[in-house]
Image: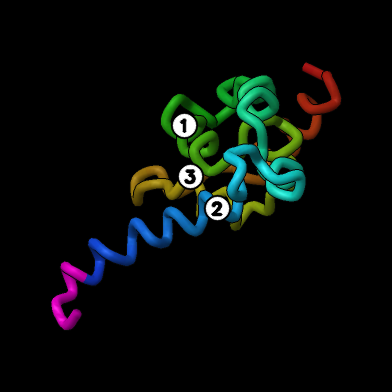
Amino acid sequence: MNDPNKMKRFIVPVMLTCILLLLFGCTGKATPAAAATAPSIATTAATPVVRDDLTRIRGIGATYASRLYAAGITTYAALAQLTPAQIKAIVNPSRAENFIDAEGWIAQAQLLAQGKP
């Protein structure tokens, strides 16, 4: 088997078969170890994503909010834990918008996380 394409066609199905055998064994049912470590669809789908309205913070518009959401910063508490440098790296302001009040965003996020307007 010197042809790489033939090798791929052989190895991929073999690897998939091995993975399935490790997960389900020969019985077709998940082994207790695999079932315990594999996340179930029901638990992952039922977990709601908390998403605060970051545009309530002065200086954060729809564009910056979407960049923060994309980076996994979805709550006021998560935003409050960032450093100004981290915020600037995430929102990546253009040259014209280079000044953002990251410290102000952090302070506002801390207040909003505590339930204060």
Judging depth in this view, the residue of 60 and 52 nearest the camera is 52
| Residue with the most extreme front position | 27
The disc at residue 91 is 3
Residue type for callout 1: Ser
Q: Where residue 35 sits: x, y (%)?
A: 71, 41
Residue 72 relative to residue 14: left or right: right
Residue type for callout 2: Leu
Q: Nearer the viewer, mark 1 or mark 2?
A: 2
| Residue drawn at point x = 47 percent, y = 31 percent | 66
Q: Is residue 51 above or below residue 26?
A: above
Residue receiving disc 1: 66
State which tag comes first along the sequence, 3 or 1.
1
Residue 29 relative to residue 36: left or right: left
Q: Where residue 62 sits: x, y (%)?
A: 45, 25
Secondary structure beneath disc 2?
A: helix
Q: How far apart are marks 1 and 2 (CA)?
A: 42 Å
Look at the image and tell me whether residue 54 can be seen: yes
Residue receiving disc 2: 21
* Pointer 1 local density, CA inside 10 Å: few below 14, some 14–19, many at least 20: some
| Residue drawn at point x = 76 percent, y = 44 percent | 32
| Residue drawn at point x = 65 percent, y = 41 percent | 30
Q: What stretch is highlighted in magenta?
A: 1-6
